[in-house]
Amino acid sequence: MSDIEAGLGLKRKHLIAISLLVGNDHDMNGVRGIGLDNALHFAKAFNEDDILNRYGSFRVINIFLNHLKYLNVMENIVLYHLKYLNKIWLFVHFLLL
């Protein structure tokens, strides 16, 4: 551990945050879109006392943004189907006239 601290300037909590970001044996996925380089930059940006609190905030924001993307996709799917339902309704209405 002292070699890692001396070589990279990372303490134990920094390594925990990096493993949470890139994935580990408990969470193989980590945070989508975050690789080792980004996780290392993130960890080095904060001191050991703040790193896990900052990770928690980052994770919440990331989950929120992923849900927004999902809602946008769902909205596009609904609009796509409504467009065709409108065409079907116009066709049926035309047949009934």
Image (spheres, rainbow, N blue to C red):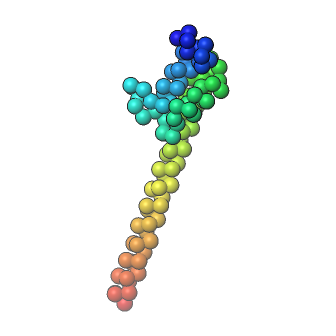
Residue for point 65% across, 20% down: 47
Q: In the rendered image, which quarter is residue 61 located in?
A: top right
Apparent side of residue 45 relative to residue 93 in the rendered image (left or right):
right
Of all residues, the one furthest to the bottom in this rendering is: 97
- State the residue in front, 40 or 70: 40
Apparent side of residue 34 relative to residue 48 in the rendered image (left or right):
left
x and y percent of residue 94 in the render?
38, 87
x and y percent of residue 62 in the render?
54, 39
Residue for point 50% across, 44% down: 66
- State the residue in front, 37 or 92: 37
Residue for point 53% across, 20% down: 15
Residue for point 60% across, 16% down: 7
Apparent side of residue 88 relative to residue 36 in the rendered image (left or right):
left
Of all residues, the one furthest to the top in this rendering is: 2
- State the residue in front, 33 or 68: 33
x and y percent of residue 19 in the render?
48, 25
Visible residue check, residue 52: yes
- State the residue in front, 16 or 68: 16
Q: In the rendered image, which quarter is residue 52 located in?
A: top right
Q: Can you say whether 29 is above or below 17 in the image? A: below
The mark total stands at 0
Visible residue check, residue 63: no
